[in-house]
Every structure is written in C-alpha cells, then in structure tokens.
Amino acid sequence: MDTARYEQILKDRQQEILTRLHKIDTDLGRPRDQDSEEQATEAENDEVLEEFGEVGEKELKAIDAALDRIANGTFGTCVKCGQPISEQRLAAVPYTPFCQECASGK
C-alpha cells in the first residue's frame, strides 16, 4: 500500500477543511445587519455555517487519527478486526479506521 499517497491526500483534505473553517469563523464574526428581517436570515445562515463547522471538525479529527495510524504503521488495517482495509474503501474514505464489513456492522 502506498501510504505516502494517502498521507498526501489526507494532508490536502486537512488543509481544505482548515481553510473552510477559517472562512466560516470569519463569516460568523461579521457585524450584524440592523434590519430585523435580514437579522433573521443571517441567524439561519449562521446555524448552517455552525453545522458545516461541526462536520469539518469531526472530519479533521478523523484525518488526524488516520495520520497517526500512518505514523504508527497501522494505516490500512481495520482497528476493529485487524483485517486489511480495501484500497477501494480507502480511495472513497481515506481516513476510515474500519474495513467495509466492520463499518456496516456485520
């Protein structure tokens, strides 16, 4: 398995998320409009941004854990059953800690 390739994929994705989270923080910190209708729209938008931020934070944690597994030499091995994770699964979800069977709960 080419762990260096996965490490680069993970680091690139990590950087994308960090950039997106920075933009979200900037948007959430902007001054509010004085118009009450506009404030309601801004509040709804802020809720969506906060949800995106939470999703991004969760993905960052998963990426950090995958990078740790690369550093420890355990990347590509299911943390539950110890079997290899398929290249196809890693290509779809490079930070996954589970093989397809364990992820589906079988």
Image: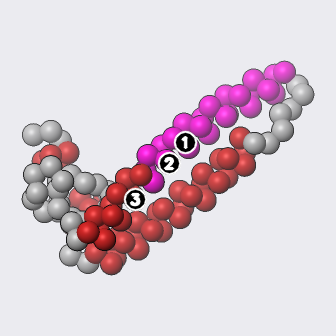
Q: In front: 75, or 47?
A: 75
Q: Amino acid at mark 1?
A: Phe
Graded by Cα atoms within 10 Å as few (under 14), some (14 to 19) or many (20 or more), the crowding at tag 3 reads some
Q: Which mark is residue 52?
A: 1
The magenta-colored residue range is 36-60
Question: How far apart are labels 3 and 2 at the CA level?
Answer: 12 Å
Quadrant that contains the C terminus:
top left
Q: Is residue 60 left or right of residue 37?
A: left
Q: Position of residue 99 (x, y in %)?
A: 17, 54
Our reading of the magenta stretch's main secondary structure is helix
Disc 1 vs disc 2: Cβ atoms closer than 8 Å? Answer: yes
Disc 2: which residue: 56
Question: How far apart are labels 1 and 2 at the CA level?
Answer: 6 Å
Return the disc, 1 or 3, that comes first in the chain's sequence: 1
**10 in the magenta segment:** no
Disc 3: which residue: 64
Q: Is residue 2 left or right of residue 12?
A: left
Question: How far apart are labels 1 and 3 at the CA level?
Answer: 18 Å
Q: Amino acid at mark 3?
A: Asp
